[in-house]
Amino acid sequence: MDRIERMKMVKAMEYIARQINDEEVFYGWLTLGVADGDIPYGDLEVGLLNLDEDPAYWYTEDETFSELMYHFLRKMRQAGTSGGLYCDHVACDEVTRRYKVTITYWIVGVDETPQTTTVRIKAKSDRGARDTALGKLMGEIQETAWKGYAVTVDSVKVEEA
């Protein structure tokens, strides 16, 4: 076991986790990851002398270290679908959310009652989810609808899933 490498990893995970831009997710890290105050903010140094005096040392035992990595990855996944990361006044703009889009439509001259389809989509915004779902629906209708018939979209409902 290379404690120095593990201590570097512990401090790196702690530093990155402190950039989570969602308080609930971050508080989860404080509960399941590195306790608040154990490692001073921004401390990425690992000295070669007196390793057991470094607070990161206590997180390097096999089971503890494994659990810490697991919780770090879990919190990063959660951060990726909520507030992303925030550092030096820059927020991550790659945050995606899951949406459920329900579209009610008619194929004019064919349908006597409206058809409804529901699509689950990952997108950055509800507008992006709506546009993606409509594009997907139109692609499916084009393959199955008769030529010469128009499609009328009656309603589009977008909600976070």
Image (spheres, rainbow, N blue to C red):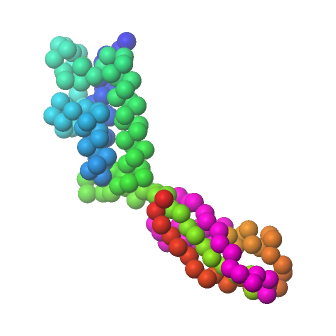
Q: Residue furthest right?
A: 147
For image coordinates 73% across by 68% down, the residue present is 140
Q: Position of residue 22 (x, y in %)?
A: 30, 52
Residue 122 versus residue 77 in the image, above or below: below
Residue 92 percent across, percent down from the top left: 37, 55
Q: Identify the residue at horizontal 37%, vertical 48% (top origin).
A: 79
Nearest the viewer among 62 and 9 is: 62
State which quarter of the image contains the N terminus.
Answer: top left
Determine if the magenta segment contains residue 108: no
Of 160 and 75, the residue lying toward us = 160
Q: On the picture, is 139 further left or further right than 102?
A: right
Quarter-of-image position of residue 43: top left
Q: Quadrant of residue 147?
A: bottom right
| Identity of the residue drawn at 33% across and 21% down | 64
- Membership of 120 in magenta stretch: yes
**Compared with residue 47, is residue 12 higher up or lower down, i.e. above or below?**
below
Q: Please give the name of the residue rendered at 46% of the width and 57% of the height, measured from the top-left corner.
A: 96
37 lies left or right of 98: left
**Residue 66 at least partly seen:** yes
Q: Where is residue 45 shown, x and y percent of the image? A: 23, 28
The spot of residue 133 in percent (x, y) is 60, 68
Which residue ends up furthest to the front in the rendered image? 113
Residue segment shown in magenta: 109-136
Position of residue 80 relative to residue 97, above or below, is above
Q: How many tags in the picture? A: 0
Q: Is residue 6 visible?
A: no
